[in-house]
Image (spheres, coloured by chain):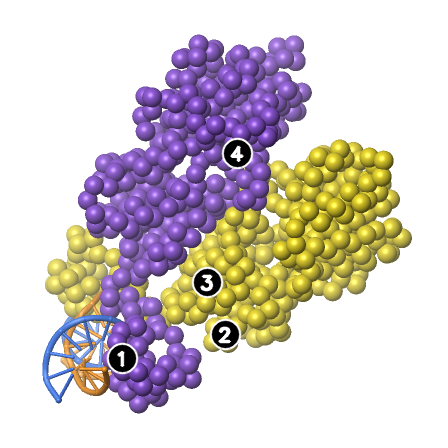
Chain colours: A yellow, B purple, C blue, D orange
DNA sequence: TTGTATGCGTTATCAG
DNA sequence: CTGATAACGCATACAA
């Protein structure tokens, strides 16, 4: 910047003012802009950050970018931040709880303006010095949590399966140890089944337990080549996808013998069709909510749980007519905890 | 840091030395560490960056994080950078050429130690001030390019289809306007077909042209419900996946009527099975090559094109026996341009 | 409106 | 081995 000032024959402060778009005499501005172009000057973010104590950046802490749902979140959150003149700093944790806390430290070192985190870590140390927003995990009323309507989604899934003629359902999911928002998928499902008077079973696999146990569960419920269930609801699309492979190996046809609904709304290449019939999470709205909540933290009255609506969408593993418009909501759970 | 010094009753320089792990008297170190813990001190990255002129960060410029192949690259590159004590700064471009150049400017402002970019932009302005590595796009001998063996992959695909009994092949892809490394997939495919004496057709869709044209191409080659081709090779898994849906709508069975091979090696949830039979790109090796090349740029003799081996893998859309070990390489293209 | 000078938090140099 | 101090690039309060 000193070089530019010398080159333009003006003072340092004038250059700074030009760079920051503050009022500067017309001919001075011209001289400075020419000098900047001539020298190819770019301001130094570190210097500016040090001086202003603002980095215009937000930490995004997430397990990985391999899972398509996470990848989609990363994408949309980055877009939303960009819209508001901020940058996202990505940190991957692979669910490592020690690393999750380290990463928060690093974010603090980087003087980020806020943190958005997706972690189920019960021992997460949440700094009170900067705005913090979580996704899918409620910590306390002072930490806003953005999630989709998991309870409503479970409710919706059960209702849809019932509508499609299912007589006996099952819900299967991974990860019972930690209570988080996605846990409510089960509760919504159970409530609906009870209300509908539909028999059902719940199968929960502890984190880290072998997949094999799911297969055993299904085998145990297969008699004479016939599965006891005609409708399955899975905690995630990922799990649904995997178990569909297992079902096919078992000689069970999807959706003819058993209809399957997942949760998330994973699309193979972003904008394309779903991989299973599913409860779709509004990823873009979730991203928008995270960012706007984080950046308006100075305003009081931020709700501590922001719950976004989900909807059902056909994806080939149920017996709907694909072209029939599916209503956005049905059998609304009036008692949704969300 | 001044606060810590005061709290510990030592000088500023001593605190700095403790923070940086330089030799400090035992009792002094203890006093400083206690003070740091007491005050919850974290060093300020901006201050350090300003002073040292090193940010230990690397820019990663990529179209988006929705495409699973890109998402996977982002993941592995971040891991590799982490291993080497660097941070990745992610910038998404959505193929916007103006933005691609802007983003390079921003990276420069951030004083990154290097840039890794995946862009096909012919007008990309590559700064000569810092190390720059591209993925899948060769610019000049002074800019190292990391890519997989696209020519060899095309060759491999044709050979595999021939082995599996195909008599008439076709290759379909998007994006002819720009010459990049993936363009060589076609060349490898054609070479192999010619060598094998196998009839084939090539169908290229300009960027932005409607998908419809692919469907028309296929329809035009369907006579009496029967497709003229019994083997299809696609430029990417994404395209293969989409066209398989089209084929099924046309009443063509995959793989019974026509066998399909894609390119990339997209896995549904990172570690799981492929979505189509495909030529697998070694994503992790690509990430490793990008990072190590970028960070060893001071050494002379960096090759300008780093070409990593691909392999074929069964993914359900061909007639291989899934359990039969597929040799890593076959019909090696001795004239591979790579 | 423009110039000058100070300090942000850190590291490095140099004197003790 | 430790303490004091200058300098990194920038924004801003104050003086001109």
- How far apart, in angstroms, are the residues tagged by discs 2 and 1? 30 Å
Q: Which residue is drawn at 87% across and 44% down?
A: A167
Are labels 4 and 3 assigned to the same chain?
no
Of residues A283 and B257, the one drawn nearer to the viewer in this rendering = B257
Point out residue A151 in the picture as x, y percentages from the top left corner: 73, 58
Q: Name the residue under label 2.
A: A127
Query: SS for tag 4?
Result: helix
Q: Name the residue under label 4.
A: B238
Q: How many labels does the image show?
A: 4
Query: SS for tag 2?
Result: loop
Single out the mark in the foreground, 2 or 1. Answer: 1
Neighbourhood count class around disc 1 (C-alpha, 10 Å): few under 14, some 14–19, many 20 upward: few
Residue contact between numbered discs 1 and 3, judged by CB atoms under 8 Å: no
Point out residue B268 in the picture as x, y percentages from the top left corner: 57, 41
**Tag on residue A59?**
3
Q: In this view, does B252 lie to the left or right of A5?
A: right
Query: SS for tag 3?
Result: strand
Q: Chain letter of disc 2? A: A
The tag earlier along the polypeptide, 1 or 4, is 1
Are labels 4 and 2 assigned to the same chain?
no
Q: Which residue is drawn at 56% across and 36% down?
A: B274
Point out residue B156 in the picture as x, y percentages from the top left corner: 44, 24
Point out residue A234 in the picture as x, y percentages from the top left corner: 71, 49
């Amino acid at each position: 910047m000193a070089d530019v000032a010398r080159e333009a024959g003006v003072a340092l402060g004038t250059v700074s003012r030009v760079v920051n778009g503050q009022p500067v005499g017309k001919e001075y501005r011209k001289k400075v802009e020419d000098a900047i172009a001539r020298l190819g000057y770019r301001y130094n973010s570190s210097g500016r950050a040090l001086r202003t104590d603002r980095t215009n950046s937000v930490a995004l802490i997430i397990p990985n970018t391999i899972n398509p749902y996470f990848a989609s979140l990363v994408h949309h959150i980055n877009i939303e931040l960009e819209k508001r003149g901020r940058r996202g700093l990505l940190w991957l944790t692979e669910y490592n709880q020690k690393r999750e806390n380290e990463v928060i430290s690093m974010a603090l070192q980087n003087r980020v303006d806020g943190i958005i985190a997706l972690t189920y870590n019960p021992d997460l140390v949440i700094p009170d010095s900067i705005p913090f927003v979580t996704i899918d995990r409620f910590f306390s009323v002072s930490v806003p949590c953005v999630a989709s309507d998991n309870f409503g989604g479970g409710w919706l899934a059960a209702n849809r399966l019932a509508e499609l003629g299912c007589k006996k359902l099952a819900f299967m999911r991974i990860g019972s140890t930690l209570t988080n928002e996605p846990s409510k998928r089960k509760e919504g499902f159970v409530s609906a089944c009870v209300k509908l008077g539909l028999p059902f079973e719940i199968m929960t696999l502890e984190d880290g337990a072998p997949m094999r146990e799911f297969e055993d569960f299904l085998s145990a419920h297969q008699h004479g080549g016939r599965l006891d269930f005609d409708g399955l609801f899975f905690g995630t699309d990922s799990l649904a996808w995997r178990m569909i492979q297992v079902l096919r190996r078992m000689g069970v046809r999807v959706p003819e013998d058993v209809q399957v609904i997942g949760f998330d709304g994973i699309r193979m290449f972003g904008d394309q069709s779903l991989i299973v019939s599913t409860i779709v999470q509004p990823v873009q709205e979730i991203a928008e909510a995270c960012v706007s909540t984080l950046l308006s933290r100075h305003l009081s009255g931020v709700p501590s749980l922001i719950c976004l609506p989900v909807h059902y969408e056909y994806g080939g593993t149920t017996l709907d007519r694909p072209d029939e418009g599916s209503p956005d909501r049905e059998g609304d759970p009036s008692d949704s905890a969300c």
